[in-house]
Image: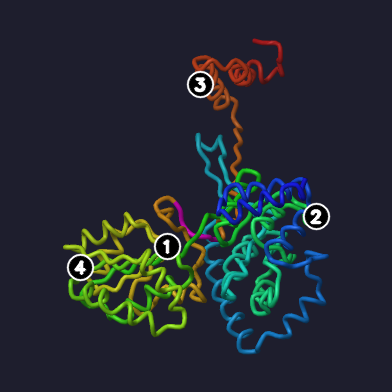
Amino acid sequence: MIEELKSEIEEEYQAGDIVKTVNNIIENVKSGGDIAVKQFEKKFDNVDISEFRMDDITIEQILSKVPGNIKEIIDTNIKRIEDFAKFQFSMYKNMEFVTDNGKTILGQKIVPIENVGVYIPGGRYPLLSTPPMTIIPARVAGCKRIIACTPPGENRPNPATLYGIIKSGATEVYTIGGAQAIAAMAYGTESIKPVNKIAGPGNAYVNEAKKEVFGKVGIDLLAGPSEILVLADETAKEEEVMADLLSQAEHDPSARCCLVTTSTELAHSIYKKMDSYINKLSTKEILKKSWLNHGVIALCNTLKEAVEYTNNYAAEHLELHLNATNTEFAFANLTNYGSVFLDHGVPAVFSDKLLGPNHTLPTLGAAKYSGGLSVGNFLKILTYSKVTDNNIRDMLAHRVKIQSDYEGFGAKARAAELRFKENYSRGDIDGR
């Protein structure tokens, strides 16, 4: 079956039909297991893999290549990200609500998801902060098994990326990439036990795979391409605005960057200077495409109008380059963003790397209904109930029976009826 579909999948891949390609990959991994994964790694990453899971000796050999100063940076990043994740975790509590004059107890308990998987992209750049951002919230939440999948190939995984994966707390590391990695984590293979939830960023094929396996497993969010909106007034520093816009645009030619401003002078100046500024940067080829196709400058008459525009855009990263009064007004009225940075001295790139809050954030308007990755993504809030008084139980039973009869649910009505005092005390299962 796998061999029969290879040519079909190749044609679809070349044609860019992401949905069909991903569905075929998933179906092949479900039916073919390890063999299918190996074939797709050979096809897409040009790598022959005998064992997916990285052993301790191989890991240690790769980690020995990480420069000491990079280890120190990653260790510091881990500490900052872990501290914020622990702060988030402290907001989740086991709680009991006592009502009906102490006769009814309603509660919740916080339980970590046992098995989770994280995807760490290979990509054109080694993303050193992605492992801590995805793995640490799961570890702080108390997840027992945290597996990481990252693409194989020449110079993959990057030694520093692998260092972050191990130091952040992954319990298993597999060299698998793309949609086949998502399928393997979701459905399992002979050598990979399935997980209950998958987190982490990726390209369009990874995102589509996460979308397709949702339901079989949970997912964090469908993130990407990267985006930033800078909300600025006449006090903004021109070069800071340009650099910050481009700091997200350089991730991908499809990345989006948007300047929203009340300053005509700032808008016109950046419009005139951006192309020459891009040409000074090492990632200029990506930036040219991103700015040309997805760059926006929105000039608004008032700050209120600018805030409304910003809320409608719902950016992944939102920076405020405003004076103190305008910052106070904007922050009070902004509701749709992945993460906001409240002054020009703290750019989004700080959060990308090490600030503390998670950098896996909603994109393409998803901030209108969703937040970023956090400890809460790896927790379940489970509720429980207990009624200790026969009179309270009788009241509940009568009300449930009346409602169930009205709705036409006979079994529900009978289940409630059996809890009437006269039946419940006798253990009567034949009726009143």
Circles 4, 3 touching at the beta carbon (< 8 Å):
no
Residue identified by numbered label 2: 35
Label 2 sits on a secondary structure element that is: helix
Which residue appears at 30% of the width and 60% of the height? Answer: 310
**Disc 3 residue crowd, few under 14, some 14–19, many 20+, Cα 10 Å:** few
Residue 163 in picture, x, y percent from top left: 68, 77
Circles 2, 4 touching at the beta carbon (< 8 Å):
no
Residue 382 in picture, x, y percent from top left: 60, 45
From the viewer's perspective, is 340 left or right of 269? right
Residue identified by numbered label 1: 316
Query: Which span of residues is magenta-colored?
Result: 370-374
Q: Is residue 84 above or below residue 98?
A: below
Residue identified by numbered label 4: 262
Label 2 vs label 3: CA separation?
Answer: 57 Å
Q: Disc 2 or 3, which lies upstream in sequence?
A: 2
Q: Is residue 82 visible?
A: no
Foreground disc of the pair 3, 1? 1
Label 4 vs label 3: CA separation?
Answer: 58 Å
Q: Disc 3 or 1, which lies upstream in sequence?
A: 1
Residue identified by numbered label 3: 399
Circles 2, 1 touching at the beta carbon (< 8 Å):
no
Circles 2, 3 touching at the beta carbon (< 8 Å):
no
From the viewer's perspective, is 401 left or right of 239? right
Which residue appears at 68% of the width and 58% of the height? Answer: 181
